[in-house]
Image (tube, rainbow, N blue to C red):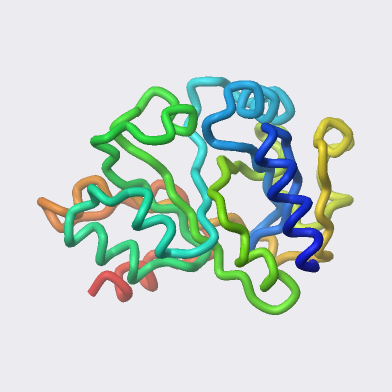
Amino acid sequence: MTPEDVETFERCISVGGVAIFPADTVYGLATEPDSREGVDRLYRLKGRLPDKPSAVMFFEVEAALAALSELEPRTRHAVESLLPGPVTLLVPNPARRYPLACGNEPDKLGIRVPRLEGALAPLASARWPVLQSSANRAGQPDARRIEDIDPVVRAGADLVLDAGSLPGTPSTVVDLSAWEEGGTVELVREGALPLEAVLACLR
């Protein structure tokens, strides 16, 4: 991964293109969060139902917090404690930001900030968020390598960034929508970060 790769990635996203890119877990598909055309193409490539939510990925925690300035103090602190890392956080979205990512739940938004180290470190300089989902057809395994991605998905993407083999376990998905008032979290999907580690960070 080079700075030139990141510039190409940003150009692709800025015009509503769909890119295959590496994260700290598995390969993902990305597009501009507010591009209806880009989001529709991404969903068609995956064979994903349009009412299913996706996550918005930021490349630094400060950018996520700035974009979601209405987050209340406890939730904001939880975001700061858990990110960056291999976790997707479902947070309250009272301003209904990024509606194309929210599916049928506009008051809740999934956010990601990957931990980009080593060969992936240049990607941390990306300036704009992306709507992202794993680069697999619905129901198929997540992709650890580019060659693991369905050929239809690869052929349909405008850009493919190959960073070799990734860890291969998708992000843990944690619902923080009741954290502010009730102090409770819900594990939506087990993944790369064990629930015990999530709870330890929140403590």
How far across and down, in percent of the image, does residue 109 sit? 38, 40
Left or right of 124 on screen, residue 193:
left
Give the number of callouts.
Answer: 0
Q: Quadrant of residue 118?
A: bottom right
Image quadrant holding the N terminus, namely bottom right
Q: Residue at x 39, y 23 (%)?
A: 104
Measuring from the top left, give residue 6's x and y in whole percent: 73, 59
One can see residue 190 in this view: no
From the top left corner, tell me how far across and down residue 32 is, in percent. Answer: 60, 37
Residue in the image at 60% along x and 42% along y = 133
Residue furthest to the left: 181
Q: Measured from the top left, where is residue 150 in percent x and y?
A: 83, 38
Instruction: Quarter of the image for the C terminus: give it.
Output: bottom left
Q: Which quarter of the figure has residue 185?
A: bottom left
Relative to 44, residue 82 above or below? below
Q: Residue at x 27, y 35 (%)?
A: 95
Q: Say above or below: 80 vs 188.
A: below
**Could you tell whether 184 is left or right of 148 in the image?**
left
